[in-house]
Image (tube, helix red, strand yellow):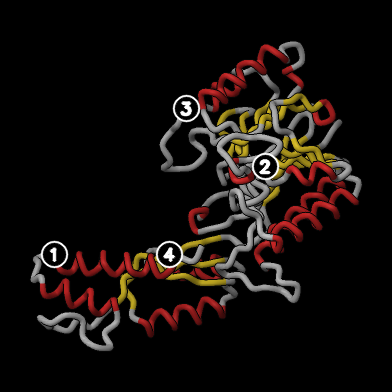
Amino acid sequence: MTVKAILSDLHCHKWSRFSTLDSKGVSSRLTIILNEMKRAAKELIDAGGKDMVLAGDLFHVRGSIEPSVFNPTHECVEEILGMGIDIWAIPGNHDLEGKDTSSIGNAMQTFGAMDGFTVITEPSLVKEIDAVMVPWVASIDDLKSCLDSLKIDHYDDRDILDVIIHAGIDGVLPGLPDHGLDGEDLANLGFRRVFAGHYHNHKEVYPGVVSIGATTQQTFSDIGAKAGFLLVDDNDYKYRASHAPQFVELNEDTDPNDIPLIADGNYVRVSGMELDDKEINQIRDNLNDLGAKGTSFMVARKTEATRTNSTQAKGMTLAQSVSAFVENLKSPFEKEVQSRCSAILTRVEAVSE
């Protein structure tokens, strides 16, 4: 029985939010991602396997990879190959310089020169892992045509082959509109299973059709998403949850008894409240004491509005100036407008990536 580890959407990057640099200048958050990749390699070996599949988006920044990102990632890949593991990879959209996949325009192609690392830039049958691998295709219609052709090309043995793609499947991310790649349609292609990268949430969308999920959570847009990797054999797959810090959220409806468990070891965003600077600092200190790896606030700021008909007073902050301006409008919706303006200012201040 063959066993393979499937990872996707590592997004190796010099992440700055909640990150520090070690003595070599490596981002602590990049180190966390690479450690998860090495953990997957060790679990693969323990399970008796030797093949690792990267289902796209090894890197994060399109068309520009910093040496402080590329070199540690290269060292990690070299270490994994040194364990006797073979790596099979398809480029994702973030790995590309242009719109579509090519051998010259993807950031992981250099790794293909390493013994044991194979980059797949065209739809290909990889017999070593009993899978058909399909790199990023920008057009959903073109991807569907490609998958339909696979059904014909590999008709005789497709029931013992997995398909590995980098494409979002409808229904994986709550609230995201469907775009036409349906789980049932993928199942009807007749292959054993379909594993898809791209969307950062692990979910079996339809029997035998699985969104892999990102290896780690990366931003607050990943709140609630299941990150990790898969161990896959001929008959089944097992989800291995990420050990990396998660992005979590606290609001006025959060049960206080749950806060220590939610905050400990994670990146925390406090939202939906009205707080002054003293309260924000107190909450931040409390969360740090509970073991939070970082805190962010997306709240309405309590301000002491000053009535004035003049332009911004000397020494007045932007938040105070906006508050005074809204108050001078004498709108019946002043409270609601003040709250919206404060939330917008806070959101802008919180942007760091």
Cα distance between the residues tagged 3 and 1: 41 Å
Where 162 falls versus 173 (above or below)?
above
- Residue at image coords 36%, 69%: 346
Kindly identify the amino acid type of the residue bearing the numbered disc 2.
Asn
Q: In the rendered image, which residue does mark 3 sit on?
A: 180
Cα distance between the residues tagged 4 and 1: 28 Å
Q: In the rendered image, which residue does mark 4 sit on?
A: 254
Where 256 falls versus 307 (above or below)?
above
Disc on the earlier residue, 3 or 1: 3
- Residue at image coords 44%, 33%: 178
Q: Secondary structure at mark 2?
A: loop
Nearest to the eye among marks 2 and 3: give it: 2
Kindly identify the amino acid type of the residue bearing the numbered disc 1.
Phe
Q: Picture coordinates of residue 239 (x, y %)? A: 69, 44
Q: Picture coordinates of residue 311 (x, y %)? A: 16, 80
Q: In the rendered image, which residue does mark 2 sit on?
A: 106
Nearest to the eye among marks 2 and 1: give it: 2
Where 313 falls versus 69 (above or below)?
below
> Left of 168 or right of it: where is 53?
right
**Towards the viewer: 176 or 65:** 65
Mark number for residue 333? 1
- Give the image quarter of residue 349: bottom left
Q: Secondary structure at mark 3?
A: loop
Nearest to the eye among marks 3 and 1: give it: 3
